[in-house]
Image: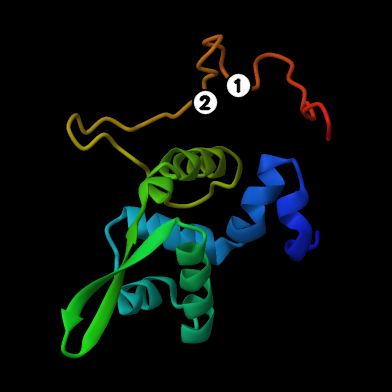
Amino acid sequence: MNDKNICADPCPIARSLAFLGDAWSLLILRDAHFGLTRFDQFRKSLGIAPTMLTRRLATLTEEGILEKRLYSERPPREEYVLTAAGRDFLPVLIMIGAWGSQHRSGGKLVYIEDAETGQAIKPVAIDEVTGAKIGSRPIRFVLPDGG
């Protein structure tokens, strides 16, 4: 896959993976949803090299998933907060986690619970139009006319 030409690809999965397709980016987003915002917090949580973290944060910021916010003027320090697009990614992370719990389990695993009820969350992807569980009915990928 050629990242420079990926924006021309009509597939939304390919376009998303062009900048979200590595584990570090997904783990940064996971940690951002856990409330981490500062460079050192991400570095400590992930054990990632500073240069790699700098690149991933820059990409997520450029793509509008995170935004920088000044939290200290002297010395100038910025934190990274989720944008609306970043917050909209939470269900995707939850579904990846659910798939991992089912197919990549072994040993102790973190699970996700509803903060109000304390009940474990068991996510499912539902088609809003039909109400059918995704994967329970045949699907097809359709290229728009003119492409």
Residue 110 shows up from this direction = no
Residue at the spot of label 1: 134
The residue to which callout 2 is attached is 125
Residue nearer the viewer, 136 or 39: 39
Mark 2, residues whose alpha carbon is within 10 Å: few (<14), some, or many (≥20)? few
Q: Nearer the viewer, residue 83 or 41?
A: 83
Q: Residue at x 48, y 52 (%)?
A: 107
Q: Mark 2 belongs to which amino acid?
A: Ala
Say which residue appears at 81% left-offset and 59% top-offset.
Answer: 1
Q: Give how far across and how far down residue 127 sits, in percent.
A: 55, 18
* Comes first in the chain, label 2 or label 1: 2
Taking depth in this image into account, of 23 and 19 the one nearest to the observer is 19
- Tell me where residue 95 appears, x and y as whole percent: 50, 38
Q: Secondary structure at mark 1?
A: loop
Q: Position of residue 91 (x, y in %)?
A: 44, 38
Q: What residue sits 51% from the left and 85% below the top?
A: 51
